Amino acid sequence: MKNYRAIIVEDERLPRLSLIRKLEDYHPEISIVESCEDYGSALKAILRHRPDILFLDIQLQGHTTLELLRELKEAMPLPHIIFTTAYDNSEYLLQAIRLAAADYLLKPVDVSELAKAIQRIKDRDEHNAFLSTPTNFATNKYPFRTLNGTLFIGKKEIVFVRANGNYSHAVLTTGEEIILERMGVIEARLGETYFIRAGRNLLLNREMIYKVDGKHKSCILRSSDGREYNVDLSAGGLESVEKFIKQGNNTKS
């Protein structure tokens, strides 16, 4: 079992002690190297210890941990991050995702939710180890980091992917997923055989491109079961799709 080194950043004493106790009682594989209660001490401790996991309260006195993370990103690769917060607010969640947060937990931290968050970190590490093996590229499905852990997705299941900062929104034949990876990483993994880059922020499944509307800058993708998906295109995206069509593909316009 892999051991992890963690730092807790929490400016309230009781929540900080509660989290320490829950980690010690239920997760012996996690060693707490330091706990901090303010921005300055947290920055120094993180740069000194370079932990595997950060437990960060979003709101510190006079600062947010989002500020802290932006400063850290300039000095070191970010470790796994779990936000702990009293704010049940989707805007905080999206900001956390954009800064590569591993998870987002509400205080008081529930033991079962904490366990799920830690398991997702372990899944992410297994996922990264899997990507480093050559056999990955011979498989039919590829691992992607999502809010619900590692998800294995086949190329033919992906309709399109739209980037949004450090994460991407994937529309699949089975539903929708937030993928916690940049567009360039996703594109490199999937390759050009199945997908076309339609502008800077969009990947389209080549085999599903069914109809293009140049006037309204959009296209329709159709899956093998007949479902249709309307996708808005940028000017550059429309140009890429029209070029793809002119190369002899059977797409309506």
Image (cartoon, helix red, strand yellow):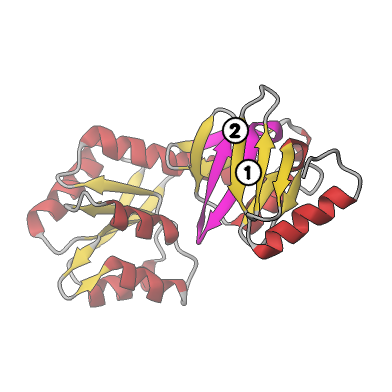
Q: Residue at x 14, y 47 (%)?
A: 18
242 or 175: which is nearer to us?
242
Q: Amino acid at mark 1?
A: Phe
Coordinates of residue 192 in the picture (x, y in percent): 79, 49
Relative side of 187 to 61, left or right: right
Residue on which disc 2 sits: 152
Q: Residues within 10 Å of mark 1 (few under 14, many from 20)?
A: many
Q: Residue at x 20, y 49 (%)?
A: 20
Residues at circles 2 and 1 in contact by the CB criterion of under 8 Å:
no
Q: Residue at x 34, y 46 (%)?
A: 30
Residue on which disc 1 sits: 160
Q: Quadrant of residue 5?
A: bottom left
Coordinates of residue 154 in the picture (x, y in percent): 67, 32
Relative side of 87 to 66, left or right: left
Instruction: Reply above or below: 15 against 133.
Output: below
Q: Is residue 53 visible?
A: no
Q: Amino acid at mark 2?
A: Phe
Instruction: Reply above or below: 25 against 85.
Output: above
Instruction: Reply above or below: 148 against 68.
Output: above
Under circle 2, the secondary element is: strand
Tell which residue pokes out farthest to the right in this image.
Answer: 248
Coordinates of residue 98 in the picture (x, y in percent): 43, 59
Confirm whether the magenta stretch covers residue 160.
yes
Residue bounds of the magenta highlight: 150-172
